[in-house]
Image (cartoon, helix red, strand yellow):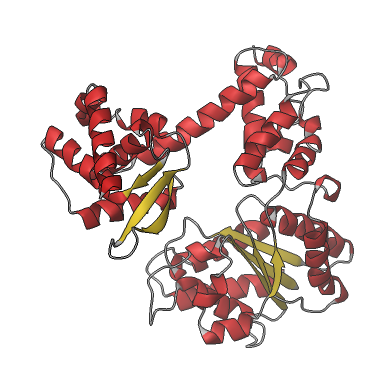
Amino acid sequence: MLDDEGETSVFVNRDLVEPDTIIDEERIVGRDDQLESVVSFLKPTLQGNRPPNMLLYGPAGTGKSLIIGAVTQQIIELCQSKGERFGVVDINCQPINTLDQAVYELVQTVAKDVGAEVGVPETGVSTKQKYRRLYELINDHYDSVIFILDEIDLLVGRRSNDEPAYSKLLYQLSRASNTDEIEGRVSVAALTNDPKFMEDIDGRAESSFNPRDVYFPDYDANQLREILDNRRDAFRQDALEDDVIPLVAAFAAQSHGDARKAIDLFRGAGDLADERGDGRVTEDHVRESQEEIDKDRSLKLVEGLTTQKKISLYATAAVASHSGRTGSSVPSPVGFKVYQWVTDELDADQMTRETYVKYVKELSTYGLISTSRKSRGRGGGMYMEFTFTGDPEAMMKRIVDDTRLEGIAEQEELLRSIVNAQLKDFHEQ
C-alpha cells in the first residue's frame, strides 16, 4: 500500500513546498537587492573579518528567514572548504517567554549543532551560568559565529526598568567578542515584522548592536507567481493544471503578499489531491484548500476566546452581516447595543461599553477585524468603527459552535430587525 501511494502521489520532492526549506539561490525571486545586501554584509567572514550586525525587517512571509538561511548555508560550505569553523545559531523567539529561556535555547542549539552535552540544566542555575556555557561551547567549536534571532520583537519577557528581554539579549551577544567572552568573530542578525522595533531598545543595547538595516517589502502577485513557478518541480511534471499557480498567487496576493502562505496553499492543494487519489492538482483543490486554511485559522482563534469575547465578537459580526446600510463597518455604539441584547437573551453577565470596545479591539491583534477612530462631528464625540477582514456571517457560524449561542442563531430575523433599528437610531442622532 505504501509503495502504491508513493507511485500515485502528485509530489516528487515535497520538501520544496515546505516554507522553511533552505533553497538554492537560483530559486530566490524578487529579493535581488536584499540578497546582495546580506551577502555583502556577511562576506567579511570569508576574509577573516567580523561582519556587521544586521536588522532584517518587513511583513511576515517576505523572505527574511529565506535569505539569511540561504546565505549562511553557503558561507558554512565555503568556510568548511577552507578549514574554517563558521557557526550559525538560529532560534525563533516567538515561543520563548524570558531572557533566561532564550539563553538556554541558544545553548541547546549550539550543543546540538556540535554534538556536545548541553552542560547546564534548564532551571536551577543563573542566566549568567548559561551565558558562560554558551560562550564556552562557541569558543571550543567555532572560529566565527552568527546569531540569528527570528521574531526578536516577541521576546519581551519580564521587563526591568521598562527594558524588554530582547534588548538585554542583543546587548550581551553583540558585545561578547569585545569583552573577550567569545574569542572568535561574532555578529547578530535580528529578524522582525515590526518596523519600529529599535524604538524600545535600551540606549546601551542600541549602541552595541548598531545594525545595518535590510528592508523586505511585500511580494506582488507576479513575484508570488514566479516563486511558485520556481518550486513547480516539487510536483510531477504533469501534475499541475495550468490555472493552479495563477490562482494560488492570486489568493496569496490578497493576503498582503505573504510567500509563506502561498507555499502553504500550494502544498495544501497537492495534499488534498493525494488524499483523494486524484492524479492532478486542479483549481478546485486550490479553492477547497484555501477554504480549509481560512476555516482552521478562524476556528482556532474563536475556540480560544472566552465566552464574553465570543459574545462581543458575535454581536459585532451580526451588525456587519445584517446591516443594509454600513456594509461591513460597525460603529461601536451600535455593536454595544446589540451586545446588550444578546447578553440579556442569554442571561449572561453584561460588561460595560468600555469593556466591550476593549474586547473587540483586542480581536484586531488576531487579524479578525481592523479598527479606526471616528468623529460624529462638532459636539458629537468620538467612537470606534470595526471592519471585518473576512466574512462576518462565516464568523457568526463559527461562534455558534459555542452551545450557549445556538438560541440566538435561531432568532435571525429578530436579530436583523434589532441591528437595523439600532443603526437607524445611531445615524439619526
Compared to 162, does 389 lie above or below?
above
Compared to 60, does 116 lie above or below?
below
Where is residue 352 shown, x and y percent of the image?
17, 54
Where is residue 107 shown, x and y percent of the image?
56, 65
The N terminus lies in quadrant: top right
Query: On the image, which quarter does residue 83 sit in?
Result: bottom right
In screen coordinates, is 132 left or right of 392? Answer: right
Query: On the image, which quarter does residue 15 sit in?
Result: top right
Where is residue 275 shown, x and y percent of the image?
60, 17
Depth check, front residue: 427 or 17: 427
* Residue at 70% across, 36% down: 249
Query: On the image, which quarter does residue 43 sit in?
Result: bottom right
Q: Is residue 181 visible?
A: no
Compared to 239, does 123 lie above or below?
below
Instruction: Pick out the residue farthest to the left.
Output: 347
* Residue at 30% across, 28% down: 401
In screen coordinates, is 276 left or right of 343? Answer: right
Where is residue 303 shown, x and y percent of the image?
34, 37
